[in-house]
Image: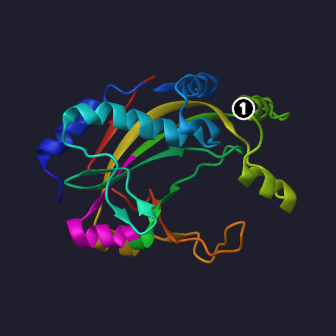
Amino acid sequence: MIISQRLLNEVRKALLEIPTKWDGHKVYLDWQNASSSYLRQTEWIGFRFQELCEQLLRPTQMFQFPGPKYKFANFDALAEIPWDFKAHIRQNPRGQETRKVPGTDKWATNQAINNYGASGFLLGVGTAVFNDAVRSFQLWHDKLKGGLSKYEKERLSRGAPSRLRKTKFILEEIWIIEIDEKLVMKMPSFQEGFRNADGSPRKAKVMLDLNMIVPLEKLVFIH
């Protein structure tokens, strides 16, 4: 373990206070009232997890926000090592279990490991309620944020289907993960060979395979 026991204790103590039941309508309305840039984001659960982690970890005075930047990849925080905060839904809309989580830019992850000895993830794992068949939550959010984003308009012009939105989330676990050089070499890649809407190549990301990862600690929330 690269990080200190003190840091691990502080993370555990802070994140045990996290709210665990989130409603998408309330989250977006709170962001609207706060004039938050997150209001236009469609994958709200990940941004809400990041926001809560920052709020709870900042008082420890052990974290800097944001973390180091490597070209176009910015880590969410720095505390002894660079950290990213990710949320993961246990099942897809068809009820199938998912155990792989898109992580951070692969090149940036390797650079961080070279510089600090490891990089870290705080991974919020839980279950979600998905939108109904008529996508009422999506329509409500589009209206709230003032219309479709540029990305959504490009998607429509390509005739690509939109993903089913999540309307609620229950946080069940937080995995505290440390990634070293040996582990990152075993992890698969994500987006390698993919292209953006404008045709430019996407940067490969580390794919966190939860079947291959043993977290430093797992915080479990009982509901």
Could you tell me how many numbered marks the image carries? 1
* 38 on left or right of 110: right
Quick one: SS at disc 1? helix
Magenta stretch: helix, strand or loop mostly: helix
Residue 55 included in the magenta stretch of the image: no
Placement of 104 over or under 174, stated as above or below: below
Q: Residue at x 57, y 52 (%)?
A: 98
Q: Is residue 70 left or right of residue 21?
A: left
Q: Nearer the viewer, residue 199 or 221?
A: 199
Q: Is residue 125 left or right of residue 63?
A: right
Judged left or right of residue 166, residue 106 is left
Which residue is pictured at 72% across the width and 32% down the height? Answer: 141
At x 62% / y 78%, what residue is drawn? 193
Q: Which residue is mark 1?
A: 141
Which residues, given as a range, are shown in magenta?
108-122
- Residue sitting at x 35%, y 37%: 54
Where residue 102 appears, as percent x and y from the top left, is 52, 59
Q: Position of residue 65 (x, y in %)?
A: 32, 46
137 or 199, which is in the foreground?
A: 199
Residue 202 visible, this orientation: yes
Residue 50 at x, y = what percent?
A: 43, 41
Q: Residues within 10 Å of mark 1 (few under 14, many from 20)?
A: many
Three-letter residue code for mark 1: His
Q: Quadrant of residue 175?
A: top left
Residue 213 in the image: above or below residue 199: above
